[in-house]
């Protein structure tokens, strides 16, 4: 269980997060939404102590992150960022093995290798094992990065826009993978830009605006036209999506007239 | 770790042994390689007897009494002196310096994620040069002063770049260039006002003509230990190649890795520079060449660079001391003259970006 209490963070004197409180449990996919610059990525950085908080606490299974070494944190929390490319010719297996970094003392053990293989199986990347990381497609690369995160054997999986650069098939592929991991007992917190994907995949949604949490709850509770207008500053309609049994958010745009004559 | 990498290292290790023997054989007095090899074996054997003699005097006395000896002595004493006291220390010093520069260059390229990085990049060569120049004009020990100059420089540059407990890589590079330029200017000033600038200029070109067993002994300790400890950071450097933020997410204390790798590279480089002057290019191109051959994995790349750097400098040094009859060329000229065209050839042949 991940618990965040009154967390404030920022860069220099500029506060980017103010007084955030949030709980995420095993088996739950928590989506973090909000406009660019609202503090989503900063939140993930602060949870992992890559950025020191100004005030507040982060607890993982009751242990304060502040009292943990960075290695210990990496054994509990894995982060999947949006990785566009890796320019060094490592094999896929080497990249996934890097997930074992917090565990490896000296050189890798048979157990490490087995965990790596298992992580690759779960993410359908085992067949890419000996390929160079520089030669993968965007979707394959993102799956490998998730395999690396699984290799960390984490309690908490944080995802920072894991799908925004991918095509629709790969987006769904990745999010299914994440959903599955959560059902197997991981705590998942994902920054997602696509509100409709968030509505479908998340059990709980946090809406951030200017570093403040303006709404938390189920997708039905959070994704209201009022909330979204307040955060994103555009009018929207939210209609029930009967095909997927979730919500559908539509920006209200004026019909576009072709002005090029 | 993949198999091809391991076989490359094995091949390079054999190549290094062959290079040591053949290059010890080459010189103005011709001594054939097989005689050289025998002298070397006899020397090693005598060295071992010396050591065992100290531990088990009776065993050694017994062996000497029975005339047990691995090779028959078919060479003259003068040949033995040339091999043992002149050529061997020189070849071994080339091995050490080449290994040190190449390994440190590899570490700096990995750490700074910069293809232009070499062991001197953050001003170390300028610091060593200034130290050496002061040594020459003030008649103080040059080796010691150049070592101290390099170490102080890296310490100053590191602390200038430190912002709130962190050392951003680009700040490190830029402050290294700034401090380096300042020190280089002071060195130029010293050369300009000095009565005998030639010594300093020769030193700056880099050479191994002052090789001696003392120098081999002093530098070998620092270089061998430094290089072996750097190897322990191979995996961490691999992870750092993913980017600092990713490395932190994987639990790496990146500032600690930077500090240790910098200090180790600096010590190894300073040790090399203090006995050889500024030998350029080895620390820049050998790691690149090995990266093309074995890939970016530092677990393979480090030992491959170490061995190749050693082989390369041994060959260049032999060339520099034998090509002209009357004088020796500074080896720094030779490394660049051979290295640069070969490197350009590799760049063209590869036809894709060499480095991220």
Image: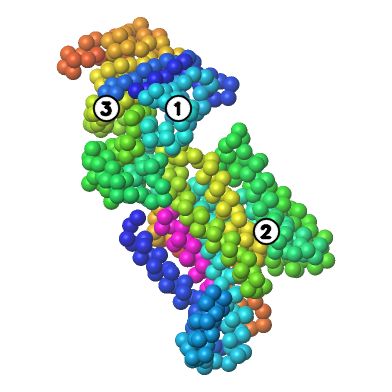
| Marker disc for residue A65 | 1
Q: Would you identify the image quadrant in which residue B159 lies?
A: top right
Q: Report how far apart the C-alphas of labels 1 and 3 lie in the structure.
A: 20 Å
Q: Would you identify the image quadrant in which residue B316 lies?
A: bottom right
Q: Chain of mark 2?
A: B
Q: Secondary structure at mark 1?
A: helix
Magenta residues span B298-315
Q: Which residue in the structure is indicated by mark 3?
A: A185
Are discs 2 and 1 located on one and the same chain? no
Image x and y of residue B245, in percent = 46, 36
Structure colour scheme: rainbow
Image x and y of residue B70, in percent = 46, 86
Most extreme residue toward the left, as rendered? A243
Q: Is residue A223 above or below residue B312?
A: above
> What residue is shown at x 50% (from left), y 58% (from top)?
B228
What predominant SS class does the magenta segment belong to?
helix
> What residue is shown at x 54% (from left), y 25% (from top)?
A11
Q: Secondary structure at mark 2?
A: helix
Judge by depth and name the residue closer to the eye, B47 or A190.
Answer: B47
Q: Which residue in the structure is indicated by mark 2?
A: B147
Q: Single out the mark in the foreground, 2 or 1.
A: 1
Image x and y of residue A241, in percent = 20, 14
Are discs 3 and 2 located on one and the same chain? no
């Amino acid at each position: 269980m991940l618990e965040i209490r009154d967390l404030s963070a920022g860069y220099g004197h500029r506060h980017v997060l103010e007084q955030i409180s949030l709980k995420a449990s095993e088996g739950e996919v928590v989506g973090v939404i909000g406009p660019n610059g609202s503090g989503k990525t900063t939140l993930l950085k602060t949870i992992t102590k890559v950025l020191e908080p100004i005030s507040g606490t982060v607890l993982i299974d009751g242990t304060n992150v502040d009292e943990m070494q960075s290695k210990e944190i990496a054994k509990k929390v894995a982060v999947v960022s949006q990785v566009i490319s890796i320019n060094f010719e490592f094999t896929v297996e080497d990249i996934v093995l890097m997930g074992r970094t917090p565990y490896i003392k000296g050189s890798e053990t048979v157990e490490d290798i087995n965990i790596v293989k298992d992580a690759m199986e779960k993410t359908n990347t085992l067949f890419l094992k000996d390929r160079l990381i520089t030669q993968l497609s965007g979707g394959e690369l993102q799956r490998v990065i998730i395999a690396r995160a699984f290799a960390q054997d984490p309690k908490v999986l944080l995802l920072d826009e894991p799908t925004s650069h991918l095509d629709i098939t790969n987006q769904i592929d990745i999010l299914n993978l994440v959903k599955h991991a959560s059902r197997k007992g991981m705590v998942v917190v994902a920054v997602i830009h696509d509100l409709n994907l968030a509505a479908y995949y998340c059990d709980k949604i946090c809406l951030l605006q200017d570093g403040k949490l303006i709404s938390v709850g189920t997708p039905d509770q959070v994704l209201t036209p009022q909330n979204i207008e307040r955060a994103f500053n555009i009018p929207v309609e939210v209609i029930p999506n009967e095909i997927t049994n979730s919500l559908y958010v539509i920006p209200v745009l004026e019909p576009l007239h072709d002005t090029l004559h | 770790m993949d198999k091809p990498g391991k076989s490359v290292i094995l091949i390079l290790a054999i190549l290094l042994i062959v290079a040591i023997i053949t290059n010890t054989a080459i010189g103005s007095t011709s001594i054939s390689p097989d005689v050289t090899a025998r002298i070397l074996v006899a020397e090693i054997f005598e060295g071992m007897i010396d050591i065992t003699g100290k531990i088990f005097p009776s065993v050694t006395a017994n062996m000497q009494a029975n005339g047990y000896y691995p090779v028959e002595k078919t060479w003259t004493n003068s040949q033995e002196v040339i091999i043992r006291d002149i050529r061997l220390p020189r070849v071994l010093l080339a091995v050490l310096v080449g290994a040190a520069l190449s390994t440190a260059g590899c570490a700096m390229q990995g750490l700074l994620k910069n293809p232009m990085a070499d062991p001197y990049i953050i001003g170390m060569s300028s610091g060593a040069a200034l130290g050496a120049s002061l040594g020459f004009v003030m008649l103080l020990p040059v080796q010691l002063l150049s070592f101290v100059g390099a170490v102080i420089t890296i310490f100053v540059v590191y602390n200038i770049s430190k912002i709130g407990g962190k050392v951003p890589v680009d700040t490190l590079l830029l402050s290294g260039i700034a401090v380096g330029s300042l020190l280089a200017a002071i060195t130029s000033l010293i050369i300009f006002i000095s009565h005998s600038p030639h010594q300093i200029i020769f030193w700056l070109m880099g050479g191994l003509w002052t090789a001696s067993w003392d120098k081999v002994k002093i530098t070998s300790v620092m270089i061998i230990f430094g290089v072996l400890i750097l190897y322990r950071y191979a995996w961490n450097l691999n992870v750092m190649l993913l980017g600092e933020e990713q490395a932190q997410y994987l639990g790496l204390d990146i500032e600690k890795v930077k500090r240790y790798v910098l200090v180790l590279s600096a010590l190894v480089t300073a040790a090399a520079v203090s006995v050889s002057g500024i030998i350029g290019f080895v620390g820049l191109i050998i790691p690149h060449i090995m990266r093309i051959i074995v890939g970016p994995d530092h677990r393979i790349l480090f030992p491959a660079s170490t061995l190749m750097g050693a082989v390369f400098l041994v060959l260049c040094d032999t060339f520099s001391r034998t090509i002209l009859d009357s004088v020796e060329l500074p080896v720094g000229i030779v490394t660049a003259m051979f290295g640069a065209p070969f490197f350009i050839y590799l760049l063209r042949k590869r036809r894709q970006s060499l480095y991220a």
